[in-house]
Structures are given as C-alpha cells and as structure tokens.
Image (cartoon, helix red, strand yellow):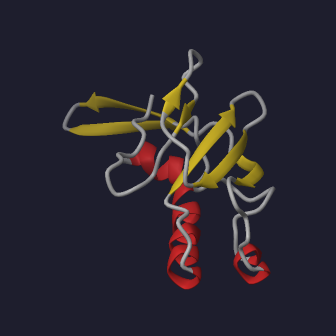
Amino acid sequence: MIQIAYYERGYMGARVQVRDDGATKVFEVEPGRIYHIKAMQILGRNDLPAEAMSTAPTVGDVYSDARISDWIGVVNSQYNRALHRWSVRCDHATADCTIQVGPDTGVRCDATGDCTIEVGPDSHPPQPK
C-alpha cells in the first residue's frame, strides 16, 4: 500500500522494503524521482470542446493515474464521449510519461518492463515491480 501511495503521487520508481525489528516492522522507502507528463495525446477523433481540454492533465504536471481517470470520467459524463481507455509510457531515464487517451489503447509490456495500461470496467491496476 505504501508503494501504491507513492506511485499515485508521481513516484513511479518507488521501492519499499519491510524488515522486522523485534516487535515492530520498519518500512524503508526509497521514493526515487517524481515523474511528469511529457505529452498528452488524444487518439482518434478529437473534437472535444476547448473547455474540456482546459481541464485536461498537461505537460509538466506530476504524473497521476487518478488525475487522468478523473478527467476522463468528467469528459465522458459532461461531453458524452467514449474515452474509456488510456495508456501511459514512462521513460525511466528522464522520468517523463507520455499519455494516450482514446477508444483503442490496450495493455502491452515490453522487455524493459514499461507497460501500456488499459483502464476500464474490466481492467486491473498495474502491479508494482
């Protein structure tokens, strides 16, 4: 849970180790770098009104999948759009993330462990490494 809390705040490389220290447990956290949004891409037809785009996560924001999901929820409910899926690809060397939003993204992981994550009613959150 601690690792997920850090992940939600943009610390995509956070590592948590637990060790027993007698009657207590000690949690050692190495948060790593904060990841930021490098690009936000709308796939397919992008006819969203300027008002909807003005509230979208933007370049330079701290990466947060909760923030992206919340924005997609607002767009879907207020503007009757079908942006049910999104994906993220993070560059661990630069701590930058590129986000794609649209109807046709999916889940794929490459050899480096970078994953494209599908978010929807039948999907599951990514598991920390």
For this view, does 94 lie left or right of residue 19? right
Position above or below: 128 against 110:
below
Find residue 20 and report its horizontal and vertical position in percent.
Answer: 26, 30
Please report the residue visible at 64 percent of the width from the left and 37 percent of the height from the top: 89
102 or 97, nearer to the observer: 102
Quadrant showing the C terminus: top left
Find residue 98 and report its horizontal and vertical position in percent.
Answer: 71, 44
Please report the residue visible at 55 percent of the width from the left and 44 percent of the height from the top: 105
For this view, does 117 lie left or right of residue 53? left
Work out which residue is located at the far left of the displayed protein and give it. 23
Find residue 94 and report its horizontal and vertical position in percent.
Answer: 78, 33
Q: Where is residue 46, by image quadrant? A: bottom right
Work out which residue is located at the far front of the displayed protein and give it. 45
68 or 29, nearer to the observer: 68
Find residue 95 and report its horizontal and vertical position in percent.
Answer: 73, 38
Please report the residue visible at 79 percent of the width from the left and 79 percent of the height from the top: 50
For this view, does 99 lie left or right of residue 83? right
22 or 106, nearer to the observer: 106
Residue 35 at least partly seen: no
Work out which residue is located at the far top of the displayed protein and give it. 111
Please report the residue visible at 28 percent of the width from the left and 38 percent of the height from the top: 25
Position above or below: 84 against 98:
below
8 or 74, nearer to the observer: 74
